[in-house]
């Protein structure tokens, strides 16, 4: 039996190659994502470990707020002297490093990373922990000189002697590039600017008496853990205000922050792997089912010669095992290539990883072979069961095709039950009033309706394809009629072939409806809420220097300017919960630039000193009423008790990251969290000045600040559409992968079908069917199968899209839109897919020798 199995596998290796390709793709994405994330993690672990001081003292970070507010948490620089006296300290320095600076050249062009990474500015202290070393020029001396990293200098065409403008939180200043430093470790993608330590505190923090941390080098033979304990003891009662960490602890903390980025990359790639696996299962099931149907006589002979059911089933599963081994091995190799490509791509965006240090952990091959073998064995279980059921008498039968006319009643019952459960879950999603249960019901409903459609798909083949191919006889005559009947001949095969394409199209159509609805909702919200003529925002939504607001306000023709700042706060609510969330602070004149619907109170009460506003639904859920006094934790450890002055009817006013829609006045924020930067400016033209006349003036004013952009309502809508488009492009990429595998499935099905119908094709050719007519017949069969899959996928996806929109409506995105252009393009594209998939099988069929085909058994 083993010899027969191996010979059978090698005899059909060409047919199984397409199935192996599906396994290869899924394994490649799994292996590639694991190798890439492991390599990045290991590389940055080495970077953090080599550049971190033995012990560091930093301000306590209770809330992650630096990115949102632009405020820099500091400590007294004089703390350095206190730490330096600790026994075991070889050296201690007051460190200055800020991340929210912008560097521009004399042409007002930004000099810095283009990948969204920050430009870090700090004091130049060359130590054994420095990530760079001075390679040309000299160290910065005095307030007018700076050191720039070589990667940033090369990208911005900056040379020694050039003058740069640095925009920092305290203000703008000019520096001359005195030297260039080269990375000695991995370049994380950030830009580095170094200043003379004597002036860094004043120019970057606004005061020479402040620092962002104290870096401590341990004396020889003093363990870092012991030195940390001594530093904590020396700080005494003040130790609770600081984070004192060893180099290992700093590296672990930095790695945890990096893990968020790696998780995004990993989940995206695993999403591709999941789609490849799901679609590949249909392909493998179909391939094995057809091979077993064509080998009915062979299996019957094996049974007649004494092979029992278990041996036949084991033979089929062994073939699947061999297929999985080949696919997983090739997929692992492809995954290594994919990871290498991602590493090189990171280099294009400024993060230089050493491809020679690629990390392939033991878990990667285990996962690769687990996925490859698992998917093929699971997919082959049902065909193996059918093979074991072949009777020894089948060896005497003339027909090789088995189970074509087997009733579909069981499929119908199972599909109806699962579909009913899925429909009930989707109905519950549509009727839900809270986001979390609605999203959970949506996930259950999507999974169940997908399974139901796959199971019951063959029942839909005859009625749907009769409609889709109804015009074929009139348009193409007997060839059209035969193509339609060929697609109807085996509903199971047709349903399984179309299912691969259906999955991808259901995903893309559902997400297209959701994204179109989001775009329409944001358009409606922008029209309703944004009353300002212009908004000024950072290109990547980071905060910017207050100097920009002063320049904008001083521009001729400018009327009202309302700044907005973001921060992180922690609310202690009456129901006992502590909620960390984002919050906004606005300047005076909010009602003139933003239209807010209030359930209670108004902007005057919301922006009053010591007051706040929040979403009415959030307030009701947590027992908050107008006049309630809430304890609020601000960044830097400051605490306040703020009065609820107003309730709004606009959930998620500032997007999904602002739970509760909390906002307050700029004076309140300055009292408890001073030093922040503006995240947006809302600008109105002065009375008598037209917005179109003001715009060129503002653009000239903002020319020295390339990090910010001036937008009107139309520009703002385009920005939102582009952001939503990023998600949609990812879905389209998933669709592309699904289509590639679906094409393989259609090619495989038609190729095996041509082999199965060899004698039939020979007889048709003998009675006068031309080669061109034969190719057209196979192409039409392929097109009708592909369009059938598209119709099922679109119908399912539209239902999913409607339910997704209901979930979005609970977040305030109430508009509903269907992207008809995308739907038409998908249907047309599915027909093209069918034509492309049929090219090779049709060509092969047309080249058959007529007499040999008639004599085929």
Image: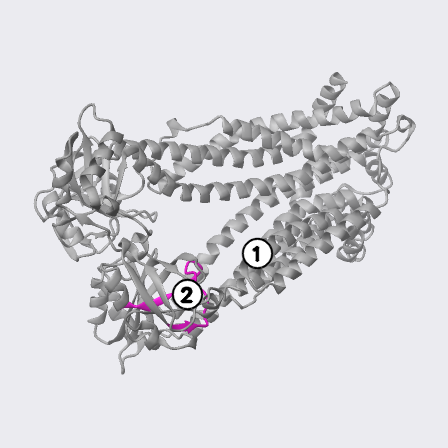
| Near-viewer residue (60 or 162) | 60
The stretch drawn in magenta includes residue 718: no
Percent coordinates x, y for residue 88 in the rendering: 17, 29
The stretch drawn in magenta includes residue 652: yes
Sequence-first tag of 2 and 1: 1
Report crowding for label 1: few under 14, some 14 to 19, many 20 or more residues within 10 A (C-alpha): many
Q: Which residue lies at the image location 35% right of the left edge and 43% below the top edge?
A: 349
Q: Which residue lies at the image location 77% right of the left edge and 48% below the top edge?
A: 414
Percent coordinates x, y for residue 840 in the rendering: 68, 38
Residue identified by numbered label 1: 439
Residue identified by numbered label 2: 661
Percent coordinates x, y for residue 608 in the rendering: 30, 73
Q: Main secondary structure of the magenta part?
A: loop
Q: Is residue 604 above or below residue 651?
A: below
When asked about the image quadrant of residue 609, the answer is bottom left
Q: Secondary structure at mark 2?
A: loop
């Amino acid at each position: 039996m083993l010899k027969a199995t191996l010979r059978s596998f090698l005899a059909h290796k060409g047919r199984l190659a397409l199935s192996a390709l599906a396994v290869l793709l899924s394994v490649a994405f799994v292996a590639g994502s694991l190798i890439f994330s492991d390599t990045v993690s290991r590389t940055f672990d080495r970077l953090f470990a080599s550049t971190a001081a033995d012990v560091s003292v930093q301000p306590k970070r209770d809330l992650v707020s630096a990115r949102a507010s632009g405020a820099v948490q500091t400590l007294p620089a004089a703390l350095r002297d206190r730490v330096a006296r600790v026994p075991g300290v070889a050296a201690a320095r007051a460190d200055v490093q800020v991340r929210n600076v912008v560097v521009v050249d004399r042409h007002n062009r930004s000099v810095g990373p283009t990948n969204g990474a920050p430009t870090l500015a700090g004091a130049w202290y060359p130590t054994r922990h420095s990530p760079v070393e001075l390679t040309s020029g000299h160290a910065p001396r005095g307030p007018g000189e700076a050191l720039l990293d070589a990667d940033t200098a090369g990208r911005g065409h900056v040379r020694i002697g050039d003058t740069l403008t640095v925009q920092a939180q305290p203000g703008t200043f000019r520096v001359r590039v005195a030297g260039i430093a080269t990375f000695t470790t991995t370049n994380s993608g950030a830009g580095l600017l170094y200043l003379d330590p004597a002036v860094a505190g004043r120019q970057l923090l606004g005061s020479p008496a402040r620092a962002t941390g104290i870096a401590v080098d341990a004396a020889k033979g003093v363990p870092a853990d012991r030195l940390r304990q001594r530093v904590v003891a020396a700080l005494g009662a003040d130790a609770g205000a600081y984070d004192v960490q060893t180099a290992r602890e700093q590296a672990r903390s930095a790695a945890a922050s990096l893990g968020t980025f790696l998780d995004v990359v990993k989940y995206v790639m695993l999403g591709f792997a999941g789609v490849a696996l799901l679609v590949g299962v249909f392909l493998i099931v179909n391939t094995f089912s057809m091979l077993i149907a064509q080998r009915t006589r062979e299996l019957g002979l094996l049974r007649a010669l004494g092979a029992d059911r278990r041996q036949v089933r084991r033979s089929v599963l062994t073939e699947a095992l061999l297929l999985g081994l080949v696919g997983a091995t090739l997929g692992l190799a492809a995954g290594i290539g994919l990871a290498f490509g991602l590493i090189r791509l990171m280099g294009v965006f400024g993060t230089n990883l050493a491809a020679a240090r690629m990390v392939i952990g033991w878990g990667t091959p285990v996962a690769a072979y687990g996925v490859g073998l698992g998917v093929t064995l699971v997919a082959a279980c049902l065909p193996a069961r059918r093979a074991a059921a072949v009777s020894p008498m089948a060896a005497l039968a003339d027909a090789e095709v088995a189970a074509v006319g087997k009733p579909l009643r069981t499929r119908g019952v199972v599909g109806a039950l699962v579909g009913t459960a899925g429909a009930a879950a989707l109905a519950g999603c549509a009727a839900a009033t809270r986001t979390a249960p609605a999203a959970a019901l949506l996930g259950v409903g999507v999974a169940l309706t997908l399974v139901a459609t796959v199971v019951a798909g063959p029942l839909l083949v005859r009625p749907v394809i009769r409609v889709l191919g109804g015009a074929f006889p009139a348009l193409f005559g007997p060839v059209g009629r035969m193509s339609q009947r060929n697609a109807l001949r085996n509903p199971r095969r047709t349903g399984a072939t179309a299912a691969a394409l259906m999955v991808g199209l259901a995903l893309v159509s559902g997400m297209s409806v959701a994204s179109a609805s989001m775009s329409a909702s944001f358009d409606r919200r922008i029209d309703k809420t944004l009353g300002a003529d212009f908004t000024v925002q950072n290109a990547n939504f980071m905060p910017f220097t207050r100097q920009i607001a002063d320049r904008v306000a001083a521009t001729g023709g400018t009327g009202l300017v309302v700044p907005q700042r973001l921060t992180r706060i922690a609310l202690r609510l009456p129901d006992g919960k502590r909620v960390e969330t984002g919050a906004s602070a606005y300047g005076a004149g909010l009602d003139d630039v933003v239209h807010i619907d209030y359930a209670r109170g108004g902007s005057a009460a919301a922006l009053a000193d010591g007051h706040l506003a929040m979403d009415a639904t959030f307030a009701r859920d947590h027992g908050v009423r107008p006049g309630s006094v809430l304890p609020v934790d601000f960044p830097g450890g400051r605490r306040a008790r703020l009065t609820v002055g107003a309730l709004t009817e606009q959930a998620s006013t500032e997007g999904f990251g602002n739970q509760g829609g909390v906002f307050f006045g700029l004076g309140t924020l300055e009292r408890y969290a001073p030093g922040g930067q503006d995240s947006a400016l809302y600008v109105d033209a002065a009375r008598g000045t037209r917005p179109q006349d003001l715009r060129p003036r503002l653009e000239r004013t903002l020319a020295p600040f390339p990090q910010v952009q001036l937008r009107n309502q139309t520009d703002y809508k385009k920005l939102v559409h582009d952001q939503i488009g990023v998600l949609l492009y990812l879905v389209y990429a998933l669709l592309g992968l699904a289509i590639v595998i679906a094409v393989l499935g259609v090619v495989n099905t038609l190729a095996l079908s041509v082999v199965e119908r060899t004698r039939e094709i020979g007889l048709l050719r003998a009675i006068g069917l031309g080669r061109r007519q034969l190719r057209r017949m196979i192409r039409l069969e392929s097109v009708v199968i592909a369009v059938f899959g598209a119709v099922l996928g679109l119908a399912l996806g539209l239902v999913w899209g409607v339910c997704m929109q209901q979930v979005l409506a609970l977040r305030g995105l109430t508009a509903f839109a269907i992207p008809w252009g995308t739907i038409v393009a998908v249907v047309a594209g599915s027909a093209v897919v069918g034509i492309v998939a049929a090219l090779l099988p049709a060509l092969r069929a047309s080249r058959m020798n007529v007499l040999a085909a008639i004599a085929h058994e």
